[in-house]
Image (spheres, rainbow, N blue to C red):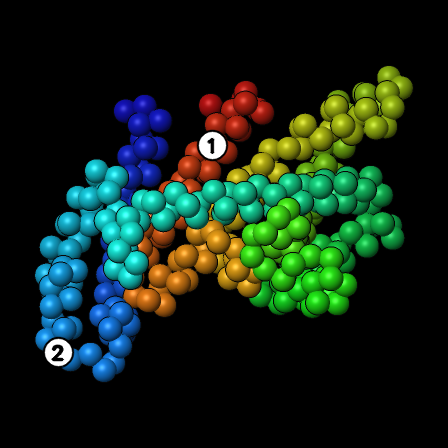
Amino acid sequence: MSSITERLVTAAIVLIGVSSITFLLLHLVPGDPIEVMLGESANLADRARLRTELGLDAPLFKQWIEFHTGLLRLDFGNSLFSKKPIAAMLAASIPWTVLLAVVSLGCALIIAIPLGILAALRPNTGWDTTAATISLLGVSIPNFLLGPLFIIVFSIGLGWFPVGGNDGVESIVLPALTLGASLAAILSRMVRASLLEVLSEEFIVSARARGLARGAIVLRHALPNAALPVLTIIGLQLGALLGGAVITETIFSWPGLGQMTIEAIQRRDYPLVQACVLTISASYVLVNTITDLVYVRVDPRIS
């Protein structure tokens, strides 16, 4: 069995496991979607009729079989709450999450790479200490605190950006900075550590001896060789960003996968929650696979 086939089989097993665990947990936690939809004042006959129409009166194993049979046909079913096809709902929300993840990653790279290079070129100096302090703040402040702080300062206080929603380019700035801050902090320290290690290699010393400019040594020789550990972090964090960025999307009312997942959980919309979690898991698997392929492109020694 080839490595690609093994990876696909492993990915399929992981996705089935995730969907099964999600299915069981949703049915074990307290709460009834029928009560959410009809209210507490609904009579027993109406509840029983709706439960039968939605197929929630069937045994759990039968519901599990029906759900995974639909997955084989790429059919997630319909939302219990809105009655809309879940595939259409995912198709409407995923592009917003992808857009937010890509912009957040861009913000993180713009901040992290110069900061990491500066700290590596001036180790154990005030520049290095400043970069480390900024990184520590970025890692330490959680999104659920940083997001409201950005809203208070830049939306309410200065009026530069809208509080939430997706009206115009300005709407994505604050959520992207909120998501990108912690990623930039992690990446900057990884760039610094990896670059410091490469700068001590013999080929860098030889390049200096040949009289190459410092900028050319860093950008053409050192930085590409220091990229592999950084790609690892980018791959893992991009998977997390594509996972929905639940807290950030909820704070800024961003119409992505994360906000839809939260709303589905609150409404006990079982099929929609399962589809959202499965999509998040598939994004992790996809990004990790792409990262592995990029490894081979960057470093041919890896097979």
* Direction from residue 163 to residue 283 in the image, left or right: left
Q: Is residue 298 above or below residue 57?
A: above
Percent across and percent down for residue 262 are 41, 62
Tag 2–tag 1 contact (CB < 8 Å): no
Give, as a three-letter code, the residue at label 2: Leu
Pointer 2 residue: 44
What secondary structure is found at the residue carrying circle 2?
A: helix
Amino acid under label 1?
A: Ile
Q: Which residue is mark 1?
A: 290
The CA span between labels 2 and 1 is 51 Å
10 Å neighbourhood of mark 1: few (<14), some, or many (≥20)? Answer: few
Secondary element under disc 1, as helix, strand or loop, is helix
Q: Pinpoint residue 131: horizontal percent, then vertical percent.
A: 78, 51
Label 2: how many Cα within 10 Å (few below 14, some 14–19, many 20+): few
Q: Which of the two residues, 197 or 299, is positioned nearer the viewer here?
A: 299
- Which quadrant of the rendered structure holds the N terminus? top left
Is residue 143 something that shows in the picture?
A: yes
Which residue is situated farthest in the top direction here? Answer: 210
Q: Position of residue 125 (x, y in %)?
A: 87, 50
Q: Is residue 84 left or right of residue 209?
A: left
Q: Is residue 174 above or below residue 199?
A: below
> Which one is in front in this view, the residue at disc 2 or the one at disc 1?
2
| Of 231 and 87, the residue lying toward us | 87
How many callouts does the rendering have?
Answer: 2
* Residue 302 visible from this viewpoint: no
